[in-house]
Image (cartoon, coloured by chain):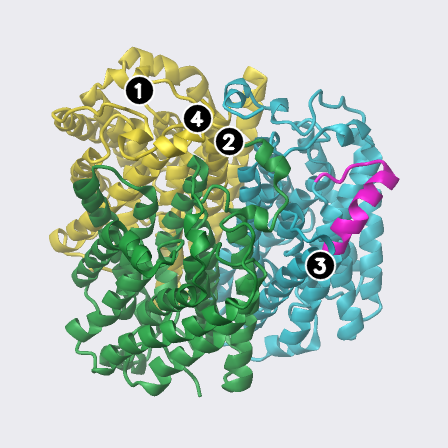
Chain colours: A yellow, B cyan, C green
Amino acid sequence: MRFSTISSSPELIAAAAEPTGVSGETAQLFQFHRGQDVFFMLMLVAFLMMFIRRFEWGVALTTLLVLAVSWPLYLIGYTEILGNELDIDAVILGVFASITLVIAIGVFLGHLSTIHFILASVLFVPAYMANEWFLFGFLDGVLDSGGSILVHMFAAYWGWGVILGLRNRRVSEVPQATSVHSVSFVWLASMLLFVLWPSFVTALLPPEAIIPGMINTYLALTASVLITYVLLWALKRTIDPLVYTYAILAGGVAIGASVDLASPLQSWIIGLLGGAASTLCFVYVHDWLCRKTGVLDTMGVHNLHGVPGILGGLVPLVLFGAPLDQLWAVLGTLVIGLVTGVVAGLILRLFPKPDRMLDDAESFPLDDVRATEVP
Amino acid sequence: MRFSTISSSPELIAAAAEPTGVSGETAQLFQFHRGQDVFFMLMLVAFLMMFIRRFEWGVALTTLLVLAVSWPLYLIGYTEILGNELDIDAVILGVFASITLVIAIGVFLGHLSTIHFILASVLFVPAYMANEWFLFGFLDGVLDSGGSILVHMFAAYWGWGVILGLRNRRVSEVPQATSVHSVSFVWLASMLLFVLWPSFVTALLPPEAIIPGMINTYLALTASVLITYVLLWALKRTIDPLVYTYAILAGGVAIGASVDLASPLQSWIIGLLGGAASTLCFVYVHDWLCRKTGVLDTMGVHNLHGVPGILGGLVPLVLFGAPLDQLWAVLGTLVIGLVTGVVAGLILRLFPKPDRMLDDAESFPLDDVRATEVP
Amino acid sequence: MRFSTISSSPELIAAAAEPTGVSGETAQLFQFHRGQDVFFMLMLVAFLMMFIRRFEWGVALTTLLVLAVSWPLYLIGYTEILGNELDIDAVILGVFASITLVIAIGVFLGHLSTIHFILASVLFVPAYMANEWFLFGFLDGVLDSGGSILVHMFAAYWGWGVILGLRNRRVSEVPQATSVHSVSFVWLASMLLFVLWPSFVTALLPPEAIIPGMINTYLALTASVLITYVLLWALKRTIDPLVYTYAILAGGVAIGASVDLASPLQSWIIGLLGGAASTLCFVYVHDWLCRKTGVLDTMGVHNLHGVPGILGGLVPLVLFGAPLDQLWAVLGTLVIGLVTGVVAGLILRLFPKPDRMLDDAESFPLDDVRATEVP
């Protein structure tokens, strides 16, 4: 069987039926660049998570390792097991799986020894594919072209499942300092993720839906850039760069499920709601949730991908008459993500914890470099 | 009415008339990537301006805010008021407006509180659209496919208008230090702007003019890379990285108006002249001009965008038999930019000046981070 | 005469013969973006080489200068002397030459005064074009679509020829420190080179070979990401970031010659071998070779481009029944590279050595900046 994450909205089916000026081969070559952009975004997510001053290289190393394990594994499952062709759609569905994993490890980065992230990747892929089948194979007419549910929600809740199963309390006690330039890399990553976001949400759309999707995505992102600033200024009179650089991307998360359905104005409002929800989660929910659960969401993934992902997943139900399956998609992804995550966390718990957590010294020789650092 | 910034050179009109192998839909999808590249360049302009050691994050934040305000505003004006369609041309013309604003704020970055840049953006968009109408609606046959006049000249002179109206003398007294890596980010931005420049100047060209435009642009840029080095070495025996990383892009500024008209050799020479003009402005004009006027052009925008923009705008008059309207385009943009800029500056002057200028502390909590900094 | 680096494999000739859905103009516009990506990669190579803490800006400056000299020179030779058209193929073949030079200077960066790299570029271009003619004009049926031989091997051995001719022993004695963020820029460059690699190896392939080439390239790279980590951990129990960030790209180097011939599984294995070969060279060969020869390969180019290039060049001989000319291509490139490199090195030896080697102070005024540095 073949998954299709292409929206099944009536308009688009009609559009796809009409003869379009773009031939199949041409459309596939366009996907080459959008697919490549998703790989680009995957790498940028690593730099978005590079703000902890003494834990920068480890984030990059771990990101490369989980990509190197998960992408080929997904392709094997997609072609050998599910019997699909190894084409550009496979490339893109595979890198969707890998970027979901890279987002997910943001929840437990620094909790494990680097080498155990290889095992985590092996545990992730079947869980992700099961949820993908649930959304587009089991349920019917789920709208999620841009991955609000498939990518962002699953990443957040699978990752949270892992820390709940793993229960590494010691990592919460590790002090986290930042440096000016460790945060400047985060600004760079966040701003380029903004730029590339349309490639991600339109990667699997038919040609005629790509330009409208691009416009909707940029409008949603500009709205979160604005609301995040206004809210932080109104609430705190200061801008925490580690909230701002994250929350401005929530518009891209929230527009995912309706990128090919919303009007430009609707997209802007969806982005506004996504940015507001993410900002409020960072400011009011994050510490409380980590304290209540006793576990640490290292990068605050729940605030950027979890809640805005749920919001985005529910939008088509409210605005675009999606079938009730859309609700089951959101609830089911939450449950499947948490359950398979907890199982992975319990397995990973069998392995010894690293001596030094949230610290590059766990993998790298750093004495010389740190000699050049301000204490 | 619909603006057209597509060159009206006879050759191209002929070319456009001939049947080309690229269908309309296909050509539009190509514009998706070039348009995205212009957003990429807009973000890179922020990093080009990130050299002031204690004023890095503020540049990124301000860039995001002015994009978030100006791009949607332009789209509203372009579609609702001027009655054009919301298509890929709108996306690109809109991001042209926004990147012009991001270049323009380089003149007065650090002069205002971050929040007042939102007002500055609201004041900018109508002024920019008025000048766009003047160039392509009022005047006839103006050649400026790559935005030497529309983007670079207007950015420089509108920004200068603002500082002349604002007259914030205190900002001139703030000491500016750099750090090795704050300048390394500038190198990164400059080198990637070089790479993406062809997407900017060919964004609105017909398919058959894109490859020749790419060749001309890279040739112009390689010429400024060379002449800037030779001049700085000859004049100063040392390379100021904050002159070099800027002036090497002047070839891209200067080729803008004739990217679809010049021969490869002509393009190289135009780039040589642009780079030389920019270098000489940085070395000999900048301090004198700021002293004479008593205001600070924070990023030296006049040296990279102002003078090379004028040069580029006049090239078609000299080499390609442009009508006299080309001269009026250059002069008119200078006047419209300065006048509307001064008005904006006078309005912005009504608001209190920030306590700390050219300093991230104006927006961000920095005590922890700066504790890790060398004094 | 016109070079063709497009693989002459029977399958592809057949494929090219069949009618494809992509028109010539459309295919050329696709090349616009892949060509631009190669310029992007060229700039990233500079950041890959930016790890020496007090020698960062100089690497960027030198990269820009050698590009600015070599690219136009190649175009002149390609069009004026060889009589080819100045089209997108010229752009790409030209930037292949320039990126080869940027890789090659990695061998002797810091050995020369910046200004002498201009002369080095003038000496490089004819040597590179002679080897290009040898491979695709003199020999017959050489398979090297992705430049394992043309780019990577020639870069390594021409560069080594230069240091052998130059014999600047003093540079070996200069201490090299790194800083956390000088190495973070290397991570960024390495990760983005991974992302863009398919554009490089498919830049000259016909449309129908691009997607398979993309899949093969990413598979080869994921394999080297994995094997490099496993080997370094097994052999050293620690990851040297300046080995890791380089060796993970060896899969892209090794797949070059067979990107359009290998199966996905074969590609993964080729990447595994490339990554392993590169890692072992960095760990066991580099110091020994520099000691034996008494010269310094500043960036360890031989370990990433030399040995994996040879490996990649020989693969089609072993797996895809390439004619014996494939062997002559590898041996001939090694000899032509070394000989023309030695000649260049002997000429460059006639000029005075810089007072300060591997140091930005050779070109830039740094007193203020270094005042903000930890000693």
Q: Nearer the viewer, residue A113 or B13?
A: A113
Q: Chain of mark 4?
A: A
- Disc 3 marks a residue whose amino acid type is Ala
SS under mark 4: helix
Q: CA distance from mark 4 to mark 2?
A: 42 Å
Camera-near label (1 vs 3) is: 3
**Residue C206 quadrant:** bottom left
Q: Which mark is residue C375?
A: 2
Q: Which residue is mark 4?
A: A278
Q: CA distance from mark 3 to mark 4?
A: 54 Å
Q: Which residue is mark 1?
A: A296
Q: Which mark is residue B234?
A: 3
Q: Say which residue appears at 71% left-offset and 30% top-offset.
A: B175
Q: Chain of mark 2?
A: C
Asked whether disc 4 touches disc 2, contact meaning CB atoms under 8 Å apart, the reply is no
Magenta residues span B279-298
